[in-house]
Amino acid sequence: MNKGVISKPPGQTGVVATILTHFWFKMFGTMGFTMVFFVAYVYLLRHPASAVSIIPATLPDRLVGFQPWALPIYLSLWVYVSLPAVLMLSRREIVSYGVKVALPCLSGLAIFYFWPNAIAPADIDWAQYPGVAFLKNVDTAGNAFPSLHVATAVFSGLWLHWRIRLLRLGRTMEWCNIAWCVAIAYSTMAVKQHVALDVVAGTLLGLGTAWLSGLKSHARGNSL
């Protein structure tokens, strides 16, 4: 059996032990990765290399109105993307996953560099919604297509699905994972950070890079 793979059905105690294994390495590693990515993301957002294209709204965008209650779900991505690594046991496996999750991030940043894009400003008085207004100040509606918010959620969701199965946490947790991932994708439209085309492209980027990262073969070779 490969290193870092749980060798017994864990149960609740095993899950807690898994989370606590290399806990600080996981926490600071995730924070460091996120910081480096966000610096590059914001730099491209503030300094586009060429003229910014506008991604058009489509019918789904007219059907999904602005819903400020979705902001906590949108922000929950930063917890969600940390979960696959949290459920890993060895430093080698965690570092390997960090390299893999960089694939959708770097792909998206490359697209933003060569094709800067954004969505059209929404006709909304953001001053009435302080939480969303703060988000708009930090992360303007640029770097839109593909949505890296959605791409990283889908990528993480697929890896998390495998970890849940490996840990034998049950169908309920599998469905909760799917629901959380879908909710994050929906929230990007509900808080008017992205349009439907961004979400579709982000989903495809997440699926494609998860496949390229070897998730399928990894899951086959690491079963209890």
Image (tube, grey):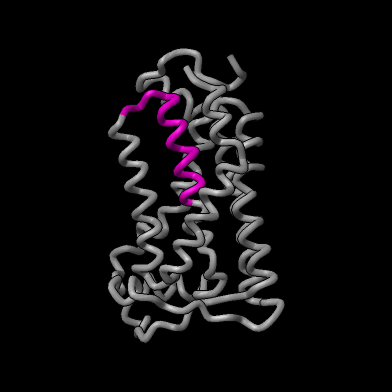
Counting the numbered discs, the total is: 0
User: In the drawing, does residue 166 fall left or right of residue 103?
Assistant: left
Residue 58 position by quadrant: bottom left
What secondary structure is the stretch in magenta mostly built from?
helix
Rendering coords of residue 153 (x, y %): 47, 51
Q: Is residue 169 magenta?
A: yes
Q: Which residues are magenta?
A: 153-170
Q: Residue at x 51, y 47 (%)?
A: 155
**Above-or-below relation of 37 to 100:** below
Q: Give how far across and how far down residue 51 sits, in percent.
A: 65, 83
Q: Taking the image as drawn, is residue 96 in sight? A: yes
- Residue name at image x 39 percent, y 56 percent: 184
The quadrant of the picture occupied by the N terminus is top right
Q: Position of residue 160 (x, y in %)?
A: 46, 37
Residue 95: percent from left, percent from top: 65, 36
Using the image as rendered, state which of residue 41 and residue 150 is in the foreground: 150
Q: Looking at the picture, tell me which residue is in the foreground, 215 or 16.
A: 215
Left or right? Give the position of 105 relative to 161. Answer: right
50 in relation to 16, above or below: below
Relative placement, left or right, of 38 versus 200 is right
Name which residue lies at 52% across and 70% down: 144
Residue drawn at x 37%, y 70% is 191
Q: Is residue 52 magenta?
A: no
Judge whether residue 39 can be spotted in this image.
Answer: no
